[in-house]
Amino acid sequence: MLLGKSRRSRPYFNGNNTSANSSNPDLPHEQSRKMFASFADRALMSRLKPKCANASTPRRTQRSRVVRVAAVARPNFFPGSTPPNHLDGTMPGDYGFDPLGLGEDKAALEWYQQAELMHARWAMLGVAGMAAPEIFGNPFVDGPLPNWAEAPFFDGYVADANTLFVVQMFLMNWAEVRRWQDMKNPGSVHADPYDESRRCTGTDVGYPGGGLFNPMGMAKSAAEQKTLRAKEIANGRLAMVAAMGCFIQHDVTGAGPVADLKAHLADPSHVTIFEKFHPFSF
């Protein structure tokens, strides 16, 4: 800059240096030129600084907008909270809820995901099985059907309870062992053991697909598949809560869910679960 050159070329000057004034009569003009160059440099720098600040401001604003948009797009069980790092929103029904940190281990998280999915599906079947006999009855069984809690002791089935239990254990063991093999080695049990031409088409564990598990041909696109999986796990979680409610309700009232619902609708002010609910009895 001009200021740097003038500092190197000029001699020391002040009002008391008379010898310098007498030996170099052009020194006052040099001092004035130096001061003007210094003021020019300062003015130039003052103009450049706001431009640099303005150039960086939109980048920060744009970056913050991207972060805000991503936070809004990410579903969260508690708005404004930060989901844990191991829950990145890729799993169906992931709302960032893991207060105990159970899914920090990746292998454990995969197991918990499959366990929740299976419990959700069984709960949906279980709640439907609890309510359906009271609503529709069963034409293949003589006499009125018992409620779900008394069903194991009913003697109107095609076989006795012990026989049905043993058959169920063998069938469930076969199904669960194959499911565990699919979790251990995905795709290893996709083929029908009796007919190799019939195969499951799913690529993710827990979603076998194919004509047997997807006979209506749903979830043709990736977006539709993601939506249906989220709906399935949401309905399954609701069914698990409903099943727990049926357990507690029968323990309190001794009746099935449909019978209790009818009694409550007939007299909603007096017939409630709290009428007979006594958690502490002495």
Image: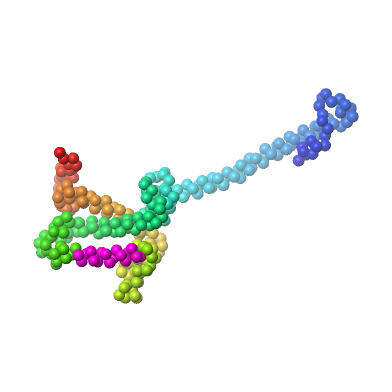
Is residue 72 one of those drawn in magenta? no
- Kindly tell me whether residue 53 is visible in this rendering: yes
> Bounds of the magenta span?
166-182
Is residue 173 one of those drawn in magenta? yes
Main secondary structure along the magenta-highlighted residues: helix
Front one among 121 and 108: 108
Q: In percent of the image, x 38 and y 48: which residue is there?
A: 101
Q: Residue 110 sits in which quadrant?
A: bottom left
Q: Residue 196 sits in which quadrant?
A: bottom left
Q: In percent of the image, x 14 and y 50: which residue is there?
A: 254
Give the side of residue 26 with respect to residue 162, left or right. Answer: right
Front one among 25 and 168: 168
Q: In percent of the image, x 18 and y 52: which residue is there?
A: 257
Give the side of residue 15 with respect to residue 145, left or right. Answer: right
Vertical order, 102 against 22 (above or below): below
> What is the number of callouts on the image?
0
Q: Looking at the figure, which quarter contains the N terminus?
A: top right
Q: In percent of the image, x 17 and y 49: which residue is there?
A: 251
* Residue 153 placement (x, y as % from top left): 13, 59
* Residue 208 placement (x, y as % from top left): 35, 66
Vertical order, 222 against 10 (above or below): below
Vertical order, 255 against 32 (above or below): below
